[in-house]
Amino acid sequence: MDAATLTYDTLRFGEFEDFPETSEPVWVLGKEYNALTEKDEILSDVTSRLWFTYRKNFPPIGGTGPTSDTGWGCMLRCGQMILGEALLCRHLGRDWRWAGGQKQREEYISILNAFIDKKDSYYSLHQIAQMGVGEGKPIGQWYGPNTVAQVLKKLAVFDTWSRLVVHVAMDNTVVIEEIKRLCMPWLDAAGACGGAEGQGELNGCLEGACAMAEEETALWKPLVLLIPLRLGLSDINEAYIETLKQCFMLPQSLGVIGGKPNSAHYFIGYVGEELIYLDPHTTQPAVEPCEDSQVPDETYHCQHPPCRMHICELDPSIAAGFFCRTEDEFDDWCMRIRRLSCKRGGLPMFELVDSQPSHMVSVDALNLTPDFSDSDRLERFFDSEDEEFEILSL
């Protein structure tokens, strides 16, 4: 049996049967637990995360393409998981918990429907794979963390229900001014209505900022911040390990997508020197919504103890994610990141700056696609792990 198609039960459950009996804290997406006294709470939290895995027998991608993503879709599934976590936080809140066998909330069903494996779901494998063609990735080719982040950013534009701003921070730099302009478009609108010369364009649109729809003037559009990073050459630089751990402690944490050679994982926390993750390498049948629009959801939640791996095994190419529902949450995230950068014992993974450095050109602010040379440069740098993550032969 090939490793790519082993079930979660045979591949993982026997390998990591439970959390270790340790007094060290367990961190899961900004929540702290005691492994000795809160084991049920840990498992409930982990089980409530959306678990997207390989699927088979779905409609052909593009009409004539693959009907299964086994062996090549693991990073796409990890991208779905990190965005799925953002949607759960957006519509249900971080403290929401899943209970199987019960009628689920309407918002939850809407979230699941956005990921069903068919062409008209916002964040389906079909949409991600076909949008990836524009990023230079043929259907069926393995993605790196940066590529899937760029694709999710493009797809989120069409999700008018969630109205997320997905921002991909490049060059290891998060620019506060840039993010606030994206999440508060009324700032540009106010400038345009004031008649300031040169401010008549909003995000590259010539229609006039004063004509914004009412919902576009909301004080803050919820932010999904994805930061592609390379934390070493062939192995993770140990100087980044403590900083990476700290990211899982932030209340805004969406986790990390990355992995190790031959597989991509969705990392949601850590205990001691081990990362906690959800593994997409299980092939399950595709799911069809019921006639009443309910979705059979048992297979979208990992009901076994999650996997763990030593943090030093992590491939250095990752993308870290954060969710800020309000401006206050973003300001709080900035404050926490600045505190982390002042701590000893760890190397900052990225830089947080107030305004755009002179050497950087904002792509998001103009709503433009990078030119070929820029895309090619980013691809070579951030997705060079494609050579290390080998597609499993079937």
Image (cartoon, rainbow, N blue to C red):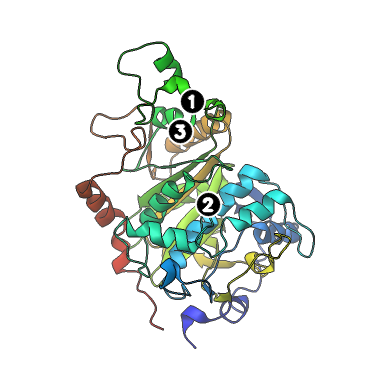
The numbered mark, 1 or 3, whose residue comes first in the sequence reads 1
Task: Report x, y in % for residue 379.
Answer: 28, 55
Q: Is residue 71 above or below residue 40?
A: below
Q: Is residue 22 above or below residue 212?
A: below
Mark number displayed over residue 212: 1
Task: Report x, y in % for residue 175.
Answer: 38, 33
Judge whether residue 311 can be spotted in this image. no
Q: Which tag is nearer the camera, tag 3 or tag 2?
A: 2
Residue shown at the point (37%, 62%) measured from the top left:
143
Residue shown at the point (68%, 63%) measured from the top left:
295
SS of the residue under disc 2: helix
- Binning the other alpha carbons within 10 Å of mark 3 as few (below 14), some (14 to 19) or many (20 upward) gives some
The numbered mark, 3 or 2, whose residue comes first in the sequence reads 2
Nearest to the observer: residue 220 or residue 387: 220
The amino acid sitting under disc 1 is Met
Residue most extreme to the right: 102
The residue indicated by pointer 2 is 83
The amino acid sitting under disc 2 is Leu
SS of the residue under disc 1: loop
Q: Which tag is nearer the camera, tag 2 or tag 1?
A: 1
The amino acid sitting under disc 3 is Arg
Quadrant of the drawing holding the C terminus: bottom left
Nearest to the observer: residue 54 or residue 381: 54
The numbered mark, 2 or 1, whose residue comes first in the sequence reads 2
Residue most extreme to the left: 373
Badge 3 vs badge 2, beta-carbon distance below 8 Å: no
Query: Along the horizontal axis of the image, is 212 left or right of 358?
Result: right
- Binning the other alpha carbons within 10 Å of mark 2 as few (below 14), some (14 to 19) or many (20 upward) gives many
Task: Report x, y in % for residue 53.
Answer: 54, 68
The residue indicated by pointer 3 is 338
Task: Report x, y in % for residue 54.
Answer: 52, 71
